[in-house]
Image: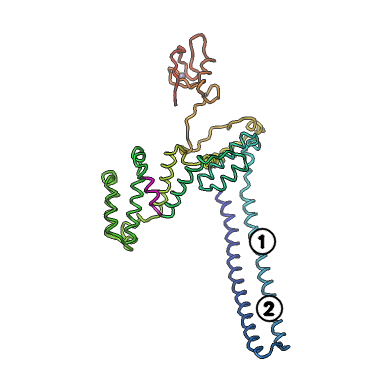
Amino acid sequence: MADSIRAVEREWSKASAKVDLARLVSTQKLGDLSAQLGECGESLRERGADDDEMSDEQVAALSEHLQKVRDGASKVSSDHKELHGNISKIGRAIDKNFTIDLDASGQENVFEAPERARMLNGVLCDHFLRQGRLDVARRLAEEAGLNLKDEAISPFVALNQILESCQERNLEPVLSWAEANGDWLKSRNSCLAFKLHRLKFLSLLEAGERARALEYAKNFAPYAEMKKREFQQLMGCLAYAGKGLSTSPYAFLLDPVYWTEACDEFMKEACALSGLPVTSHLSAGLAAGCSALPNLLQIKSVLRQRHVHDMWSAMDELPIEIDIGSEQLYHSIFACPIMKQQSTSENPPMRLSCGHVISRDAIDRLLTGLRLKCPYCPVEMQATDTKVIHF
Ligand SMILES: [Zn+2]
């Protein structure tokens, strides 16, 4: 992979250098031509002040200039055309170095059924709403025949407005939100309010408003114990109000990362409050897909080598279990190792007296009379010794 990236990068550097050179040359060339034309126009105006007719000499000089301009312009244009070759080389390098056939890892007709297509459009719509792209979401809903209700849109509109102001370093809307939902944030042990107050305090200090910052510092009072170290640092900042703060030992507190962190935390809390997942289904699906893809491609090629490539496409599930990291885990699901099925409320996971867990359907199959032998260890038990497990 690294080699492929380097190969594309090489072509990109070459093309980029050529583009820069061409820009320099053409800017100079066009500048020269424009200056020459200016001079020519100037001399024509001077000489032609008391005579409207141009002399033969003037006509000849003007045609010479015009010819130069034409030549110059066509040279610039042909230089520009040459660049296309270099740029298309980047495209070819990408095609050559990233030849992964992604189609091999998916099923073509998976979204063909109308119900599935509707679900996919719904997921896309939800994603656009989260991104604050209300116009796109509305248009998609309209064209895909989805019923997008105003109640579904309004929470996102409010959230996005607050988020945008925070990104533009206007803390008032997000501070009012945090105040209005103070009890909820407290119940979750959230530090959002502290982080927002810290940003506000530092902004005041940066603006050289030491007295206002000191007054504002009373907002830290509830966190003084919990955030002792941070509190000390902030009090230390008071010695460096104004420009001095950026060269002080506390300059690290001005890192833009603190703003990003506050924005992310606000979205996390606001989504949790509205009962929404933090990331959209589309982002979650994409992230899971990206981490699973290398494994999927590998297994596909193994299946193909063994001439059993039809095996996978016939199934509605993956042929192997893929670890996509704990961040992508949302619900624990139990799949019965005997029946190879996911558990349901009718067929729940059951704990045997030895500790092994299988589904109720599997137990029914293994029962001989009222007795049962664990399929993993030789322990025998009564059917009544098993217990339903709840996740
Ligand atoms: Zn057992």
Residue 288: horizontal and vertical position, in percent? 52, 39
Give 11 or 255, whichever is nearer the viewer: 255
What residue lies at 65% left-to-right and 66% top-to-bottom? 80
In the image, is the residue at mark 1 within 8 Å of ligand 1 by its beta carbon?
no
Badge nearest the viewer, 2 or 1: 2
Q: Residue at x 61, y 48 (%)?
A: 98
Q: Quadrant of residue 34?
A: bottom right
Pointer 2: residues within 10 angstroms few (<14), some, or many (20+)?
some
Q: Which residues are magenta?
A: 170-178
Q: Does the magenta segment cover residue 91?
A: no
Q: For the view shown, which residue lies furthest in the front direction?
A: 150
Which secondary structure, mark 2? helix
Q: Residue at x 56, y 48 (%)?
A: 135
Residue sitting farthest toward the bottom: 50
Write down the residue under mark 2.
68
Toward the viewer: 76 or 187?
187
Residue type at mark 2: give it: Lys
State the CA–CA distance, disc 2 to disc 1. Answer: 27 Å
Residue 219 location in percent, x, y? Answer: 29, 49
- Left or right? Give the position of 185 relative to 324: left
What quarter of the picture does the C terminus occupy? Answer: top left
Of mark 2 and mark 1, the one earlier in the sequence is 2
Position of residue 206 measured from the top left corner of the image (x, y, whole percent)? 34, 60
> Exactly how many numbered labels are in the figure?
2
User: Which residue, given by chain and number where applicable, does mark 1 sit on?
Assistant: 85
Dot 1 falls on a residue whose secondary structure is helix
Residue 178, can we see it? Answer: yes
What is the magenta segment's predominant secondary structure? Answer: helix
